[in-house]
Image (cartoon, rainbow, N blue to C red):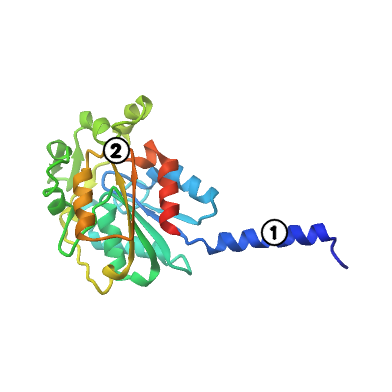
Amino acid sequence: MKLPLAALLTSAMAFGTSAMAAEKPPIVLVHGAFEDAQIWGHVTAKLQADGYKVVAVDLPGRPGAPAAPDKVSLDLYRDTVVNALDKFHHPAVLVGHSFGGIVIADAAEKTPNKIKTLVFVAAYLPQDGDSLVSMANKDADAKIGPHLQNDKAKGLASIDYSARADLFANGGPAELRKVIPDLILDEPVGPLATPVHVTAANFGKVDKVYIHTAMDQVISPSFQAKMVAATPVRAEYTLPTGHTPFLTDPDGLAKAIEAAAK
């Protein structure tokens, strides 16, 4: 039985749209310290609406992936991300926010062939031997240092409650500033001080993009620029936000991630 011309055209257009969607790389989102995968909710919805397959990873030690602080390590974070990459048959765009930049760099060192592009969102862009602690100590313009607390008995770091809105939602609406202090989690301290090992042969050969945040109080814009100068990237984008663009400008962040993915 022959199909009418209109039906054939509709079928061809649907196949073309499906083929285009299939060509889009999968995207894996990795949160930073004091966060969990819920931060990516709005960005995930936007990316999925635009035809991307998206996985938002919960690193161990969060409510969504419970683990005792003394059982959490940078290696465990890395392997959690690598396991997420294993779900796809094609190289993924791997996005890391803040401390997540160190985690995705570690994953790229282990499995560079599984990654199409690394996207650093207001993130630490490490060189060999760097850790969050060592890099944060070099960021003279960051405002977070005086507000960090370290509970050695529990193995957890925390941020002063009264400083959280200014640090993480500066420039954001009043409603967000009101709720964000209760969204900030305590963080296992072990991975924060662990040096990451990266080489030119693995991490160095993976495509990289940096998304700057122009009003950042946690990783200062000046330090973001210094990191990119030390480890050049293919492309740079800048959002007019503080440290949490996934909350204050999710559409702008999704657009930048999609530009990086092309």
**Element at label 1:** helix
* Residue 219 visible in the shown view: no
Q: Report the amino acid beneath label 2.
A: Gly
Q: Residue furthest bottom?
A: 201
Asked if 109 appears above or below 7 in the picture, the reply is below
Q: Which is nearer the N-term, disc 2 or disc 1?
A: 1
Left or right position of 206 against 20: left
Q: Report the amino acid beneath label 1.
A: Met
Q: For residue 235, what is the image quadrant?
A: bottom left
Foreground: 79 or 211? 211
Residue found 27% across the figure and 31% down from its top: 165
Foreground: 68 or 253? 253
Left or right position of 69 against 39: left
Residues at circles 2 and 1 in contact by the CB criterion of under 8 Å = no
The residue that label 1 is drawn on is: 13
Asked if 147 appears above or below 227 in the picture, the reply is above
Rendering coords of residue 216 (x, y %)? 25, 40
How many marks do you count on the picture?
2
Task: Give the class, few, some or many, for how many residues have Cα within 10 Å of label 2's Cα (few <14, many ≥20).
Answer: many
Rendering coords of residue 101 (x, y %)? 28, 55
**Element at label 2:** loop
Foreground: 76 or 230? 230
Foreground: 50 or 100? 50
Rendering coords of residue 2 (x, y %)? 87, 67
Q: For residue 163, what is the image quadrant?
A: top left
> In the rendering, which numbered label is found on residue 242?
2
